[in-house]
Image (cartoon, rainbow, N blue to C red):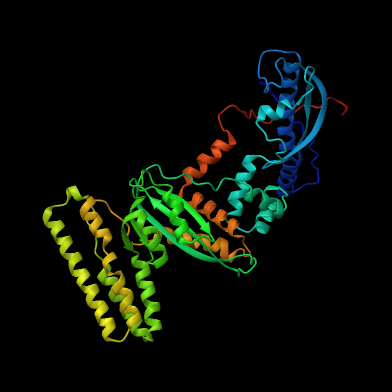
């Protein structure tokens, strides 16, 4: 179907003067409240008429799913419908046909558009709502959509749309990962039964050998053993999910995820941070705590060459191995010195981690590939998740917190996966082309 559509607007401008702002506000109001929704509704009703005429006249063209062996339709009545869209509420009446043989009713336009039986919103509006809600509270999102886009959607409706959406589903990795990174953060959940309001959400990210970050999942109210079981389903032929696990060293996490990887790398950033708190528990003075952190950071700074393994000379490789050996000895001596000064918690903390501090060096020497030694990638994500779950709202359900976390990590770490999902949902195939041909003045007859 192709044709030209003229939009008629009656403009009355005072000869005594008016402001540019008043003109813009009036124009925006008429197009947002009536113009754009009316334009979409007109196109839909024209298409509805075309489908009805062709089906009743038994012409060749698009046909709905057959209701019987020899369907034959007649006009029955019209039904009013409205849809929430990003351009406003589109109101129309679509035609209902009836099969004269079996008596079954059919709504041609609904089937032609691929709409669900009781669908009241467009998928493009659901995408907009989901993205807005992932960055601010439902209350602020409702106000934001009303003030900026003239879309008056109650926050309870926004919540219902988000919790029933499947946009948070994550694609499993297609091949083995280079790095697996996992972490957890707390939030205030909704108390239920004997559970208090302290909740925790766990999440896992992967990095492929191509350097692309792949979100793996987010869970709430689950143990790390359960998380390990979920991630284990992503493995192929019971092979390791990833080569290296980068973590903060939490015992329950590392014990559960160790079977999914071949090696573990302790996060250097967490080592320095946690050492400070360990020495605080050992009653160390502030000067000693700061000094120990600087000393540890200096020991851990073993830099890798910029080139790949194949392009590095053997003497450079030997030099790197010697630097790692010296750093390991310094770590051992550092822990011994902490014990000597009576900082036993800090000493045990360093001693328990010393074998897993230079995995990234050994990985490079063996594979010629760089592996991260800090979980900064996931830490940045945890700050964004913490901002949404902790600072903006509270009283989450466990399923709601996990779903919001999956939406955030999918949006911010895998934008391609996010856009690919919505492109499929929106069915953008190039079958609709609208061309703006300009704005023209329609002459008024004399005397009007």
Q: Quadrant of residue 347?
A: bottom left
Q: Residue furthest left?
A: 315
Residue 5, image x and y in percent?
71, 26
Q: Is 14 located above or below residue 77 in the figure?
A: below
Question: What residue is at 75 percent from the left and 35 percent from the top?
Answer: 38
| Residue extending furthest toward the right | 447
Who's the residue at 20% across and 65% down the image?
324
Q: Quadrant of residue 349?
A: bottom left
Q: Residue 280: x percent and y percent?
A: 40, 82
In this picture, residue 411 sits left or right of residue 337: right
Q: Is residue 420 left or right of residue 10?
A: left
Question: Relative to residue 200, is residue 141 depicted above or below?
Answer: above
Quadrant for the N terminus, please.
Answer: top right
Across and down, in percent, residue 260 comes to 36, 54
Residue 439 lies left or right of residue 322; in this view the side is right
Q: Of residues 197 and 442, which is closer to you in this image?
A: 197
Q: Position of residue 186 (x, y in %)?
A: 52, 66
Q: How many marks?
A: 0
- Can residue 251 be seen here? yes
Residue 357 can be seen, yes or no: no
Q: Nearer the viewer, residue 353 or 390?
A: 353
- Residue at the image position 78 percent from the left and 23 percent from the top: 97
User: If the image is split into quadrants, where does the C terminus sit?
Assistant: top right
Which one is in front, 396 or 211?
A: 396
For residue 10, above or below residue 144: above
């Amino acid at each position: 179907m192709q044709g030209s559509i003229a939009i008629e607007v009656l403009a009355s401008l005072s000869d005594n003067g008016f402001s540019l702002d008043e003109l813009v506000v009036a124009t925006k109001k008429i197009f947002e409240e009536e113009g754009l929704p009316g334009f979409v509704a007109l196109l839909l009703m024209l298409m509805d008429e075309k489908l009805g005429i062709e089906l009743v006249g038994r012409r060749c063209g698009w046909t709905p799913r057959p209701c019987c062996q020899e369907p034959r339709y007649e006009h029955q009545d019209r039904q009013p419908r409205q849809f929430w869209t990003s351009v406003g509420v589109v109101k129309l009446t679509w035609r209902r046909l009836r099969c004269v043989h079996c008596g079954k009713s059919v709504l041609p336009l609904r089937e032609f558009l691929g709409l669900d039986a009781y669908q009241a919103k467009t998928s493009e509006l659901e995408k907009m709502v989901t993205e807005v809600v992932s960055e601010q509270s439902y209350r602020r999102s409702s106000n934001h959509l009303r003030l900026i886009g003239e879309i008056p959607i109650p926050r309870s409706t926004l919540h219902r749309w988000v919790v029933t959406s499947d946009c948070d589903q994550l694609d499993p990795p297609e091949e083995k990962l280079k790095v697996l990174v996992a972490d957890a953060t707390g939030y205030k959940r909704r108390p239920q039964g004997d559970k208090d309001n302290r909740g925790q959400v766990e999440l896992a990210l992967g990095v492929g050998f191509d350097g692309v970050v792949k979100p793996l999942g987010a869970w709430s109210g689950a143990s790390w053993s359960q998380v390990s079981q979920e991630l284990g389903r992503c493995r192929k032929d019971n092979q390791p999910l990833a080569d290296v696990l980068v973590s903060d060293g939490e015992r329950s996490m590392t014990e559960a995820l160790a079977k999914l990887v071949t090696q573990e790398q302790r996060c250097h950033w967490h080592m320095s941070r946690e050492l400070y708190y360990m020495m605080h528990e050992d009653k160390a003075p502030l000067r000693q705590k700061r000094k120990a952190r600087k000393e540890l950071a200096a020991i851990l700074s073993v830099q890798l060459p910029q080139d790949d393994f194949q392009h590095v000379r053997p003497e450079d490789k030997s030099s790197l191995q010697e630097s790692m050996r010296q750093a390991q000895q310094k770590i051992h001596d550092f822990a011994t010195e902490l014990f000597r000064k009576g900082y036993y918690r800090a000493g045990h903390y360093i001693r328990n981690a010393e074998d897993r501090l230079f995995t990234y060096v050994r990985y490079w020497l063996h594979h010629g590939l760089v592996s991260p030694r800090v979980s900064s990638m996931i830490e940045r994500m945890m700050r964004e998740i913490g901002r949404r779950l902790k600072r903006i709202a509270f009283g989450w359900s466990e399923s709601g917190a996990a779903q919001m976390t999956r939406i955030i990590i999918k949006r911010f770490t895998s934008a391609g996966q996010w856009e690919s999902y919505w492109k499929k949902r929106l069915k953008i195939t190039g079958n609709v082309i609208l061309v703006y041909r300009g704005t023209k003045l329609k002459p008024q007859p004399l005397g009007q």
